[in-house]
Structure formats: C-alpha cells, structure tokens
Image (cartoon, rainbow, N blue to C red):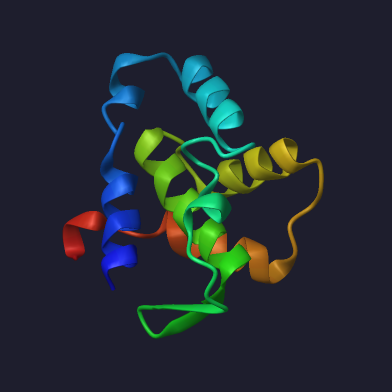
C-alpha cells in the first residue's frame, strides 16, 4: 500500500509543468521521460510483484505501469485517451494491445480528487 501511495503521489508531481509550458514542450517532455528510467517510465519505478490491484481490477506490472502513465499524461495536459494512446504507440513504436489500451484508458480516467 505504501508503494501505491508513493506512485500516486508521484503522479501529482510536476503537474504544474503543463501549466507553464506549451503543448509541444509537454509532448517533448513526455516522450523523453517515458523511456530509459525517466520520470514517466513507471515500469522501472514499480516493485517486482506480479499483480497490482486498484479499484477492484488486477493489473500486471506492465499494465499497471500503463495505468500510471495514462494518469500522469492527463495531468500533464494530454486532452483525450485517444491522443494518449496514439502518443504511447509513437513512443514505443508498436501498437498497444486491447488490454494495454484498457489499462492506459483506466489510468487516463483516474481522478486524484476522488481518492
């Protein structure tokens, strides 16, 4: 639970970034920080447990990382889950599977004010 709280709090960090930068800068930041252990490379930040449970849904580590990524890019100013999915596919160079899209979409729908 402590790890989940840490991750959720990290989602809230740098949220002012999108308010102080242009959209192109935000997209550039997202692209740079989503790889190689960057701030948005949540796969590197999560513990090595096999499943993560959030809001009654069990996620694999990879899918939970996508959940967190979706929540974070929304906070940074990405306006739609369709745009977020397209951006993620551009970053990784591959099309997301349906379960990956669902995890990212669930994260994009996350509202930290309802917690």
Q: Nearer the viewer, residue 50 or 64?
A: 50
Q: Is residue 112 left or right of residue 83?
A: left
Q: Quadrant of residue 113?
A: bottom left
- Residue in view at x 26 percent, y 27 percent: 16
- Residue in view at x 55 percent, y 51 percent: 44
Q: Is residue 60 left or right of residue 71?
A: right
Residue 101 point in image, percent of width and height = 63, 61
Q: Nearer the viewer, residue 66 or 4?
A: 4
Q: Quadrant of residue 83?
A: top right
Residue 85 point in image, percent of width and height = 63, 48
Q: Residue extending furthest right?
A: 94
Q: Residue extending furthest front?
A: 48
Number of disc labels: 0
Q: Using the image, determine if residue 51 lies above or below residue 68.
A: below
The quadrant of the picture occupied by the N terminus is bottom left
The quadrant of the picture occupied by the C terminus is bottom left
Residue 35 point in image, percent of width and height = 63, 37
Q: Quadrant of residue 87?
A: top right
- Residue in view at x 57 percent, y 68 percent: 61
Residue 78 point in image, percent of width and height = 46, 36
Q: Using the image, determine if residue 113 lies above or below residue 50.
A: above
């Amino acid at each position: 639970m402590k790890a989940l709280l840490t991750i959720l709090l990290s989602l809230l960090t740098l949220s002012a970034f999108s308010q102080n930068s242009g959209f192109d800068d935000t997209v550039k930041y997202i692209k740079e920080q989503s790889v190689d252990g960057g701030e948005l490379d949540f796969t590197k930040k999560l513990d090595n447990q096999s499943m993560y449970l959030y809001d009654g849904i069990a996620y694999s580590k990879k899918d939970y990382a996508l959940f967190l990524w979706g929540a974070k890019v929304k906070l940074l100013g990405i306006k739609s889950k369709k745009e977020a999915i397209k951006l993620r596919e551009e970053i990784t160079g591959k099309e997301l599977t349906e379960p990956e899209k669902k995890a990212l979409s669930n994260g994009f729908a996350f509202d930290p004010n309802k917690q």
